[in-house]
Amino acid sequence: MTVTVPASASVVAGLRQLRIELPSWAFGNSGTRFKVFAQRGVPRNPYEKVADAAQVHRFTGVAPTVALHIPWDRVDDYGDLARHAQAHGVGLGTINSNTFQDDDYMLGSVCHPDTRVRHKAVGHLLECVDIMDATGSRDLKLWFADGTNYPGQDDIRMRQDRLAESLRIVYDRLGPDQRMVLEYKLFEPSFYITDVPDWGTALVHCIALGPKAKVVVDTGHHAPGTNIEFIVAALLRADKLGAFDFNSRFYADDDLMVGAADPFQLFRILHEVVKADALRPEAGVAFMLDQCHNIEPKIPGQIRSVMNVQEATAKALLVDREALEAAQRAGDVLGAHGVLMNAYSTDVRPLLAELRAGMGLDPDPMAAFARSGYVERIAAERVGGQQAGWGA
Ligand code: PSV
Ligand code: MN
């Protein structure tokens, strides 16, 4: 069988455009509601988290920004944190809001029936935009834990109205180059309704708000069996895909390493991105990781994840688009499927090793990081103080 793939030069050019943003919270301790396992050398503050994120960029070359989560990453001087990031060779990225860890938010935040609580939540979101001004961040990421547990607990439609009103206030505060990206999640922590449960709800709100509002697809936030690439294709078509929160799931919002559970799904998603020419930073899709490393070492967990996204992207770039379209036009069902599978079945690791060597990097980031002695150094240096964790 002859397998035709595009010239590797165009694949390499595509891969060079890819930028992956890291979550600051991936470097702190995390766990389940049963147990948080502490690891040695874990950062004690946002400065140390940024330093760890910079290691991932140092060894992969494609992860130049780190996202902050407020208040977990609150500091006195965001300009100073931005300069610290720059000194480590990275920048500060998306600002993630947090309206889910305050006692006031037990019945919701921006959808809460009490105006006082809604004002407090909106105040937090406006503070996040102030922080974006200081850090130079483009995106405010919104995820709301809002919802209800019991039928009749609150009015579904009124909660949507409150959501729309709250979002409007924040949208109107955005600067000309700033955006809000709205994330949906099927369920959790609420079990009866979630106020932004799916891409349809997020899209309706983003369309009503305007061009600076886009949807976030967190790959862990769907029902089992959901065709995520369809959602990606539909959002790209509507110019409303703002960002990915990449991770893997088996059961719920597992926050495992992207590409670990279902690398084929990741490939199918990235195939839609490549077809829409949306790898380019100018296309406005932020590729972020949203993961927590509970049992695996954190920096290698991020390096592996970045490599998984790169591998899936390389395979997506290898799809012979001409052959695929010809087969599709001819109604050649198995031929078209075969073109896609040829790309997916290609071992792209040598290509990526070559790409890294061309960037002056070690072809094997995992091994190079292990050899660097960084883990041993931070374990020895970061003694005392309070380790950062989910919620600090
Ligand atoms: C919610 O499950 C979520 O995906 C949102 O992006 C939050 O900001 C993040 O996780 C917190 O880990
Ligand atoms: Mn997320």
Image (tube, helix red, strand yellow):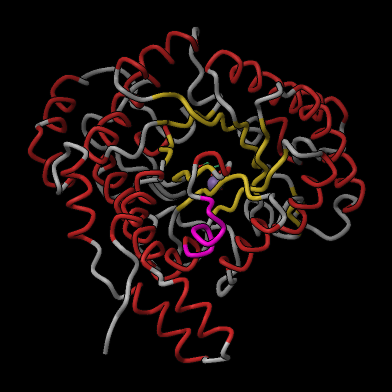
Q: Position of residue 221 (x, y in %)?
A: 58, 58
Q: Is residue 19 above or below residue 46?
A: below
**Percent position of residue 177, x then y:** 65, 25
Residue at the spot 45% in from the left edge and 79% down from the top edge:
323
Q: Nearer the viewer, residue 84 or 9?
A: 9
Viewer-nearest residue: 317 or 183 = 317
Q: Main secondary structure of the magenta part?
A: helix
Figure quadrant of the N terminus: bottom left
Q: Quadrant of residue 179?
A: top right
Locate residue 364, reporting x and y percent. 15, 48
Residue occupying image coordinates x 83% and y 32%: 168
Please tell me in which quarter of the rendered image ligand 1 is found.
top right
* Left or right: 83 in relation to 162: left
Left or right of 273? Residue 263 is left
At which x and y percent is residue 204?
81, 52
* Up-down relation of residue 110 to residue 32 (above or below): above
Across the whole image, how many numbered discs are drawn on residues?
Answer: 0
Residue 385 lies left or right of residue 313; in this view the side is: left
User: Residue at coordinates 72% horizontally, 24% vertically from top-left?
Assistant: 174
Decide: is 356 above or below 227: above
| Residue 51 quadrant | top left
Taking the magenta stretch, the answer to whether it contains residue 235 is no
* Identity of the residue drawn at 64% across and 30% down: 102
Left/right of residue 29 with respect to residue 184 in the rendered view: left
In front of the other: 99 or 350 = 350
- Which sits in the foreground, 199 or 342? 342
The magenta stretch spans which residues? 271-278
